[in-house]
Amino acid sequence: MLARGEFHRTSLDDGVEVWVTQMGSMMNMNTAFINRATGTVALVDPYDAKGWLSGLAAEGLTPTHILLTHTHRDHTVGVKRLVRSVPDLEVWGHEESVSSSLLGLVLFKKIELTHSWSHEAHTSVEWSSGGIELTVTHSPGHAPGHVTLHGHGIYHAGDLLFTAKSGRVDLPGGDSVTQWHSISHARGLLQTLPPEWRLIPGHRYEWIDGTTPDWVTIEQALAHNHALNATELEEFDALPFLRFDD
Ligand SMILES: [Fe+2]
């Protein structure tokens, strides 16, 4: 289990490195996709800007992109400082994640995206830069404009899915039926990915055996995640964690 701010690093045959860490009091999970040959460093939902900047600097690296699953405050804590510290840093998110109609100002952070995705719910687009190639799937329900990102052995689920559960639906802009459709779509998508890939949850919460692993494999999630296994809307909507646990 990762200590707060500790980086787990994997080097892949395709030249991409994946760093995973957990940061903050709610055990937010962050992923970085790194290509040293091109100097590309894409951070997903960076929490602790200082931690990321110093961890990367120790390896001679600088962030080049921020990719946001959604704009809840706990997923965007590090954005402001990173933008201040790194000129030309690109900040990506779905355009619906920063809709001006969002009322939950306590919950959502006002983020200036430099680039945005605009695809329909339950569709995907490809994102690539400097040898990093990710598929971005629009998966609303927990929050408007929520996306998941997968590639290079990782499915970064944000608050769509935790290891055993899913993100809550009772916050402003959340919707249970929409979340169920997003999870149904994710089930089909996960079934097409290599079973040994890691599902990185938005938060490191309890797994089915009471432990709190940093991630589970896609195979484990498909077999045991309660939301992924609720195939009827009624069953999904009755899950006890949808309305308080996040
Ligand atoms: Fe969230």
Image (cartoon, rainbow, N blue to C red):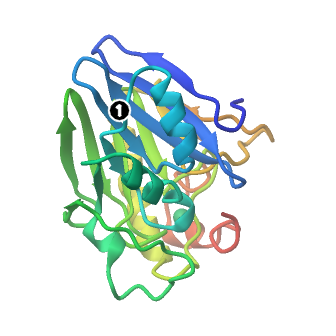
State the image coordinates of residue 223 (x, y, percent, origin top left): 57, 38
| Quadrant holding the C terminus | bottom right
Q: Residue at x 66, y 45 (%)?
A: 204
| Quadrant holding the N terminus | top right
Q: Residue at x 35, y 32 (%)?
A: 193
State the image coordinates of residue 82 (x, y, percent, origin top left): 43, 50
* Left or right, 213 with reference to 11: right
Q: Indicate the secondary structure of the residue bearing disc 1.
A: loop
Residue 33 position (above or below residue 49) = above
Q: Which residue is mark 1?
A: 193
Q: Residue at x 55, y 50 (%)?
A: 47
Q: Is residue 221 visible?
A: no
Q: Is residue 104 visible?
A: yes
| Disc 1 residue: CB within 8 Å of ligand 1 | no
State the image coordinates of residue 182 (x, y, percent, origin top left): 39, 61
Q: Residue at x 51, y 58 (%)?
A: 75
Front in this rendered view, residue 203 or 164: 203
Report which quarter residue 230 is drawn in: bottom right
Residue 47 position (above or below residue 93) = above
